[in-house]
Image (spheres, grey):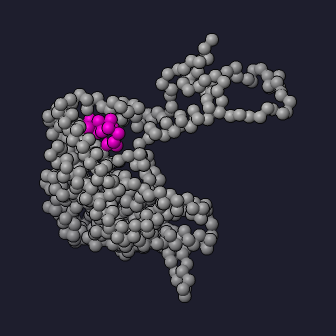
Amino acid sequence: MPHQTIFEKSRRGRTGANLPECDVPRVDAAETLGAGALRTSLPLPEVSELDVVRHFTGLSHRNYSIDAGFYPLGSCTMKYNPKVNEKTAAMPGFAGLHPLQPEETAQGALQLIYELQSMLAEICGMDATTLQPSAGAHGELLAMMMVKAYHAERGEAHRNIVVIPDAAHGTNPASAARCNFKVKGIPGNDSGRTDIAALEKALDGNVAAFMLTNPNTVGLFESDIRRICELVHSVGGLVYCDGANMNAMLGLTRPGDMGFDVMHFNLHKTFSTPHGGGGPGCGAVSVKKILEPYLPTPHVVKSVVGDQATYTLDANRPQSIGRIHSFYGAFLLAVRAYTYIRTLGARGIREVGENAVLNANYIRARLADHYEVAFDNQVCMHEVVLSATRQKVQSGVRAMDISKRLMDYGLHPPTNYFPLIVPEALMIEPTETESKQTLDHFIDVMIKIAEEAKDNPELLKTAPHNTVVSRLDETYAVKNLDLRYEPIFTATE
Ligand SMILES: *Cc1c(COP(=O)(O)O)cnc(C)c1O
């Protein structure tokens, strides 16, 4: 009779272990336990060690990652993360710390937090930083809590409106609403930037803050930013910078100098911690002096006596909004970001910004004849937003079809349908870590796909064709994740 198994790699009698002969008397299990307690069959695979290694290595290769290939997911800054960051984060002195051990035994870690706080404040032109929030959205929430506390303390608790451009990341209005602010959306202008007249109209004595991403979510620099900040300040509001796009400005310009009062960084984007799949993250928040008293506790501070520096966790901050994270946040992310900044230095940090912008504009220039570029093909910052409207009109091919076809060529798709204000958006962020050869390969494939959209649109509408699974119902797939391995066939002996 054939040996039936649900494991296609299993072969009867094959084993991965070679155990010595049993040298204790055998017990009859059925007699000892009673026959009813025993299974008559146990479906386990019979495989060699090499079979197991190849099976799991094969499964791991089904994951796409930045270590496997180009990952141009706009707004997410999927840059290469230098492995030295992992090395320092794994050092036993950092990785083995207990969050409750006495401060005097954790001086190195506290010094690292303190120095990273200071470096981030310097990079963005602000006065103080906290590393507590565990995501960009968490940083936004903290900032809105501090804005609320600031106005309340000045006797202006009636300020209940936060103004946000239509193009903003969805987390911005969500964070403001979570703090009981009313969100007032304003449209952008024809050049893809803040419409000054619409902003002026939205501003009055009830406005608590204006939240703006710069460079904004269509990858364009807000050239009127000084004027924008002046206008918001003139009615007593504060200006928040969603700093998820900080990669474009590193070493080149600083939100603090533009007039922003508070911002968040995504250390897991700009400062090179691996991310995707939901974490871990760090949404460090930097503030100007006026908001410093409201920073969450405990805050790491430095005191110097003679030539002896001591770092302490300051919990005695009466105006603080309190804790927003257990202990001190995701500390090992801070180690990675610190390593990254120290290995690059000031000059290297600036080159990150320069090359991120150069790479995005190279893609824009070479693809401009083949796809629409949102807002008239202007010079962009670190990302470029294309639109598949031309393909949609010509042959009904949508942005999603182009992305699915990219997967057939082994490339990760760009961000689709964000920002919402650009129809059929394909948002491409190459990052600074990609070579000209990689960019050229991506561009050549995108040009080929534009040709395919004309000649054989069905090929795109039914893509992907070469992946492990074909096109999924994305909404259903998110709600009903199925990550089990299932064999493709049932083997017989
Ligand atoms: C990624 C991102 C966020 C949110 O950051 P999370 O860490 O995912 O919470 C906010 N705004 C913009 C523009 C982003 O790109």
Q: Is 320 positioned to the left or the right of 453 in the image?
A: right
Q: Is 286 positioned to the left or the right of 19 in the image?
A: left
Residue 296's x, y, as percent?
A: 46, 66
Q: Is 437 positioned to the left or the right of 281 in the image?
A: left
151 over 401 or under it: above or below: below
**Can you say which quadrant of the picture contains the N terminus?**
top right
Residue at figure coordinates x 32%, y 58% from the top left: 432
Residue closest to the eye, 112 or 16: 16
Residue at figure coordinates x 62%, y 32% from the top left: 48
Residue 374's x, y, as percent?
A: 18, 49
- Which contiguous range is marked in magenta? 400-413
- Whether residue 256 is visible here, answered yes or no, is yes
Please, which residue is most extreme toward the front here? 437
52 over 42 or under it: above or below: below
Q: Is the stretch drawn in magenta largely helix, strand or loop?
A: helix
**Can you say which quadrant of the picture contains the C terminus?**
top right
Residue 240's x, y, as percent?
A: 31, 64
Residue at figure coordinates x 21%, y 70% from the top left: 226
Image quarter for residue 212?
A: bottom left
